[in-house]
Image (spheres, grey):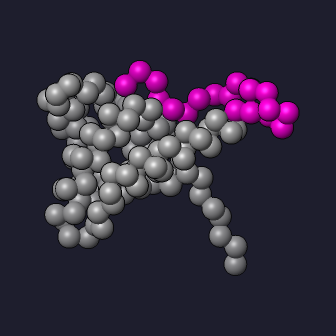
């Protein structure tokens, strides 16, 4: 039996979706309001959240990642069926995604090539 290794991007997005689910699936409108209440304000939209939790894009702003983890993880842990991961784990995995993306953007001769981005722009 062979196993398919997930990319860092897939691992991050799967872990993020699991975190939201274990946190009780807060609605996008709740997350948007909570983000707006942060100091400084974090601006996210329901569409961005849908892209991130649906596995179609990755948040590029680390403040957004910190907010999502900081908001969702305590709720997931309180549910009793989620093992907390340190913020450093999330940030390291996010950095791995960025590094993999940079590696994909280079061809075998070391020249940069332009590919369709999957990091969400303009959070």
Indicate the position of residue 41 as horizontal and vertical percent values: 21, 25
Percent coordinates x, y for residue 26 in the rendering: 22, 47
Residue 104 found in image quarter: top right
The image quarter containing residue 68 is: top left
Q: Position of residue 65 (x, y in %)?
A: 35, 40
Q: Main secondary structure of the magenta part?
A: loop
> Is there any visible trace of residue 62 in the rendered image?
yes
Residue ID at (17%, 31%): 38
In this view of the protein, can residue 51 be seen by the observer? Answer: no
Look at the picture and state if 25 lies above or below 78.
Answer: above
User: Magenta stretch?
Assistant: 105-123
Residue shown at 24% from the left, 47% from the top: 70
Residue that protrudes farthest toward the bottom in the picture: 1
In the rendered image, which quarter contains the C terminus? top left
Residue 118 location, quadrant:
top right
* Residue at position x 60%, y 52% in the image: 7
Left/right of residue 93 with respect to residue 73 in the rendered view = right
């Amino acid at each position: 039996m062979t196993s398919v290794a997930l990319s860092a991007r897939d691992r991050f997005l799967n872990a993020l979706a699991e975190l939201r689910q274990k946190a009780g699936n807060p609605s996008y409108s709740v997350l948007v309001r909570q983000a707006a209440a942060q100091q400084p304000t974090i601006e996210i939209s329901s569409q961005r959240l849908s892209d991130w939790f649906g596995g179609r894009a990755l948040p590029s702003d680390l403040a957004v990642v910190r907010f999502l983890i900081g908001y969702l993880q305590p709720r997931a842990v309180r549910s009793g069926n989620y093992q907390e991961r340190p913020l450093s784990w999330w940030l390291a995995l996010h950095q791995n995604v960025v590094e993999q993306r940079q590696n994909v953007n280079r061809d075998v001769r070391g020249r940069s090539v332009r590919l369709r981005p999957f990091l969400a722009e303009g959070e």
